[in-house]
Image (cartoon, rainbow, N blue to C red):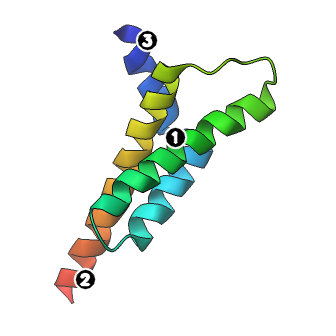
Amino acid sequence: METLAVGFLVKLFDIPGAVIGLSGGWLSKRWWHLALTALIGGSAGEAFLYFVRGTRDFDPTVWLAGVAASFVWAMLSFTVKRVLQRAK
């Protein structure tokens, strides 16, 4: 369980997942777009790690942590956008 928690914290500050999550959340118009953004962000983070370290194998728990972290960023930017729209 500690491995998943540490993996989530590492993936939370992973650049590709965070950028995709923030931009995807901001551009989303519906809540289900956030799930697609999270899947794309987690997959992009894993692809980035694979390209940097060519000998790295696919680890589903690290990918799941990346999806969850990307979803957190997407939900954060989606919520900020909604609050700013309602404040106008």
Name the secondary structure under disc 1: helix
Badge 3 or badge 1: first in the primary sequence: 3
Name the secondary structure under disc 2: helix
The structure residue drawn at horizontal position 24% and vertical position 73%, both measured from the top left corner, is 82
Binning the other alpha carbons within 10 Å of mark 3 as few (below 14), some (14 to 19) or many (20 upward) gives few
Residue 1 pos. (x, y %): 34, 9
Residue wearing tag 3: 3
Which residue type carries mark 1?
A: Gly
Binning the other alpha carbons within 10 Å of mark 1 as few (below 14), some (14 to 19) or many (20 upward) gives many
Which residue type carries mark 2?
A: Gln
Binning the other alpha carbons within 10 Å of mark 2 as few (below 14), some (14 to 19) or many (20 upward) gives few
Residue 40 pos. (x, y %): 52, 49
Residue wearing tag 1: 42
Badge 2 or badge 1: first in the primary sequence: 1
**Measured along the vertical axis of the image, is residue 85 above or below residue 16?**
below
Quadrant hosting residue 32: bottom left
**Measured along the vertical axis of the image, is residue 56 above or below residue 36?**
above
Which residue type carries mark 3?
A: Thr
The answer to whether the residues at label 3 and label 2 have Cβ atoms under 8 Å apart is no
Is 70 placed left or right of 16 in the picture? left
Quadrant of the rendering where the C terminus is positioned: bottom left
The structure residue drawn at horizontal position 57% and vertical position 41%, both measured from the top left corner, is 43
Residue 41 pos. (x, y %): 52, 47
Residue wearing tag 2: 85
Question: Which residue ends up furthest to the left in the rendered image?
Answer: 86
The Cα–Cα distance between marks 3 and 2, rounded to whole angstroms, is 39 Å
- In front: label 2 or label 1: 1
